[in-house]
Image: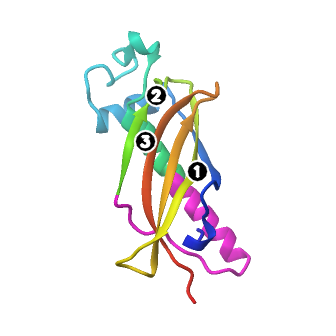
């Protein structure tokens, strides 16, 4: 992954896609979000959503899977070029999580991030803080997820 100094406001990166099926929607719901309208394909039908809808937490978990896979892929690419790699640090949190449209069985959501701002950490000078705007867009080009997250990123060794 990039170092703090490599990330600038306005940078954008598509990090991956996830296809939602009736089966993986039901499996996620049974294990992690067992509300009465999710557990199986028959009960998972939510009339107001227009079909079998995924839990918003499933949509977020798929984003996290794409983010980690992208960090891992980027680190491997840097290593293959003989460059040093940087692992992102912890996140002090996120804000403004919005599930904008239902994600239905048959949808594929593509995730991306945009850098909103960066600043060095005053208390931990070896780290910078990067504020990301994260999105998920379905195959029809409709934004289905958005949120801001802040992540500690290591500064380039001097």
Badge 1: residue crowd in 10 Å (few <14, some 14–19, many ≥20):
some
Foreground disc of the pair 3, 1: 1
Task: Decide whether residue 89 is among the magenta residues.
Answer: yes
Q: Residue 17 placed where, x, y %?
A: 60, 42
What residue is pinned by disc 2? Answer: 100
User: Where does label 3 land, which residue?
Assistant: 60
Residue 37, by quadrant, is top left
Quadrant containing the N terminus is bottom right
- Horizontal placement of 3 versus 64: left or right? right
Q: Is residue 40 above or below residue 131?
A: above
Query: In whole angstroms, how far apart are the C-alphas of marks 3 and 1?
Result: 16 Å
Instruction: Please tell me whether mark 2 sits on a helix, a strand or a loop.
Output: loop
Residue 148 % position (x, y): 44, 48
Q: Nearer the viewer, mark 3 or mark 2?
A: 2
Q: Quadrant of residue 25?
A: top left
**Sooner in the amino-acid sequence: mark 3 or mark 1:** 3
Horizontally, residue 44 falls left or right of residue 64, namely left
- Callout 3: helix, strand or loop? helix
Can residue 156 be seen in this snapshot? yes
Q: Residue at x 56, y 62 (%)?
A: 71
Q: Nearer the viewer, residue 111 or 68?
A: 111
88, above or below 41, in the image: below
Magenta-colored span: 67-92
Q: Is residue 109 magenta?
A: no
| Colouring mode (rainbow / by chain / secondary structure / one colour) | rainbow
Mark 1, residue position = 114
Label ID, residue 38 = none
Whole-Å distance between the Cαs marked 3 and 2? 12 Å
């Amino acid at each position: 992954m990039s170092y703090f100094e490599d990330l600038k406001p306005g940078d954008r990166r598509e990090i991956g896609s996830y296809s939602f099926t009736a089966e993986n929607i039901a499996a996620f719901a049974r294990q992690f979000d067992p509300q009465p309208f999710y557990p199986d394909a028959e009960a998972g039908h939510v009339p107001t959503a227009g079909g079998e809808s995924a839990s918003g937490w499933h949509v977020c978990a798929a984003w996290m899977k794409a983010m980690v896979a992208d960090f891992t892929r980027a680190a491997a690419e840097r290593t293959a070029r003989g460059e040093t790699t940087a692992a992102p640090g912890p996140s002090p949190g996120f804000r403004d999580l919005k599930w904008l449209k239902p994600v239905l069985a048959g949808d594929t959501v593509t995730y991306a991030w945009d850098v909103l701002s960066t600043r060095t950490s005053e208390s931990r000078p070896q780290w910078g803080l990067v504020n990301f705007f994260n999105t998920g867009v379905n195959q029809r080009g409709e934004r289905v997820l958005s949120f801001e997250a802040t992540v500690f990123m290591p500064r380039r060794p001097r």
